[in-house]
Image (tube, helix red, strand yellow):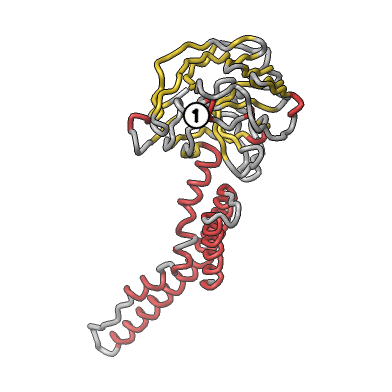
């Protein structure tokens, strides 16, 4: 078993190593599932087979020691050096290959359940969501808000809250589903979304926006125009129930034209001009945009997000080591 376990652990380390250096495309959800499954098997084997065997061996050793003491007592020897406590402890102690499998199962199982069904942490890698989310923000994503999904398969098993305009959502990047992306929902199924001359319009109605003081972007060391926008809430094209207020950036030096849009499913629903793009959101899909409007690779470039790609709703910054003031909820 020690040799087999060493091979299994080496396989996990090798997978993680090849993934780290970019030789393979890793899947963390699959890795966690396999780790939980394998360590769970070892945990069951330890509890119902290996541990009882070691305990039986320790009990046999104790029984033999008692028998030896009784024999010595019959011979008139009252004091003996028959002490098997240390030997019993060594017999009951887990070998290394169980310590690194069955011993880790409870921790791995808890982490797997938490990140698969409740909350998953993410780190913001780019500035596409500035000013709402900054590079280095460590955020929490609610995995059950839109309904519970089976890990790895991402199969929805329970109904949750409908996706609404204005939600900040994590999803699997449609051109490469192994990557997780984060953007803001601006269009729900049936919406006519237009972004022309840097003005967002939903179903023919311009989304109200108000100028705010310029935002200083530390990476580029310059000021960028900042606005406040009131996205109409609603999970359907005909539904507009209130608004969600958030900030966004516009770079006046960037043209409104969308260069280099990819081929994607339902691209025929979109019309590109020098002024920008207009799209009709198909059923079961969503139109996503970054709050850093001119520095965001979003639905304008690679298309719509299908419902099956949803990971969860982002809602809280739990840490930013560069600025503790970033901690807190966001819209």
Name the foreground residue: 230 vs 44.
230
Please rate how many residues cluster around mark 1, counting C-alpha atoms within 10 Å: few if below 14, some from 14 to 19, many from 20: many
In this image, 152 relative to 329: left or right?
right
Coordinates of residue 94 in the picture (x, y in percent): 43, 67
Task: Indicate whether 110 appears above or below 294.
Answer: below
What's the residue at 48%, 46% (across, down)? 111
Answer yes or no: is residue 143 visible: yes
Coordinates of residue 5 in the picture (x, y in percent): 53, 67
Dividing the picture into quadrants, the one containing residue 146 is top right
Coordinates of residue 108 in the picture (x, y in percent): 49, 51
Residue on which disc 1 sits: 129
Answer yes or no: is residue 307 visible: no
Secondary structure type for disc 1: loop
Task: Indicate whether 141 appears above or below 244.
Answer: below
What's the residue at 39%, 16% (across, down)? 213
Name the foreground residue: 321 vs 116.
321
Name the foreground residue: 94 vs 210.
210
Coordinates of residue 249 in the picture (x, y in percent): 48, 22
In this image, 214 relative to 304: left or right?
left
Extreme residue toward the left, this view: 79
Task: Indicate whether 174 appears above or below 240.
Answer: below
In this image, 236 relative to 19: left or right?
right
């Amino acid at each position: 078993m020690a040799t087999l376990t060493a091979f299994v652990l080496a396989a996990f380390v090798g997978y993680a190593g090849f993934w780290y250096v970019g030789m393979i495309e890793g899947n963390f959800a699959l890795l966690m599932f396999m780790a939980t499954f394998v360590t769970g098997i070892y945990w069951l084997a330890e509890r119902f087979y290996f541990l009882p065997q070691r305990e039986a061996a320790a009990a046999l050793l104790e029984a033999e020691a008692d028998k030896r003491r009784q024999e010595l007592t019959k011979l008139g020897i009252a004091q003996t050096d028959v002490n098997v406590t240390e030997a019993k402890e060594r017999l009951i102690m887990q070998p290394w290959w169980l310590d690194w499998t069955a011993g880790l199962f409870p921790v791995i199982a808890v982490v797997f359940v938490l990140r698969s069904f409740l909350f998953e942490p993410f780190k913001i890698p780019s500035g596409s969501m500035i000013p709402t989310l900054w590079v280095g923000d460590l955020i929490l994503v609610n995995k059950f808000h839109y309904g519970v999904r089976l890990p790895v398969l991402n199969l929805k098993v329970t109904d949750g809250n409908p996706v609404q305009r204005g939600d900040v959502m994590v999803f699997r990047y449609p051109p490469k589903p192994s990557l997780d992306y984060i953007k803001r929902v601006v269009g729900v199924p049936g919406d006519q979304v237009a972004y022309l001359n840097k003005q967002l319009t939903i179903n023919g109605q311009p989304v109200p926006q108000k100028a705010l003081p310029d935002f200083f972007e530390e990476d580029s060391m310059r000021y960028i125009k900042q606005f406040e926008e009131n996205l109409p809430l609603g999970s359907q094209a005909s539904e507009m129930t209130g608004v969600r207020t958030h900030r966004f950036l516009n770079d006046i030096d960037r043209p409104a034209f969308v260069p280099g849009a990819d081929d994607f499913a339902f691209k025929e629903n979109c019309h590109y001009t020098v002024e920008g793009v207009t799209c009709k959101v198909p059923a079961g899909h969503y139109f996503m945009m970054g709050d850093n409007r001119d520095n965001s690779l979003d639905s304008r470039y690679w298309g719509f997000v299908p419902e099956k790609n949803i990971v969860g709703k982002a809602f809280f910054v739990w840490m930013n080591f560069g600025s503790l003031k970033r901690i807190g909820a966001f819209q």
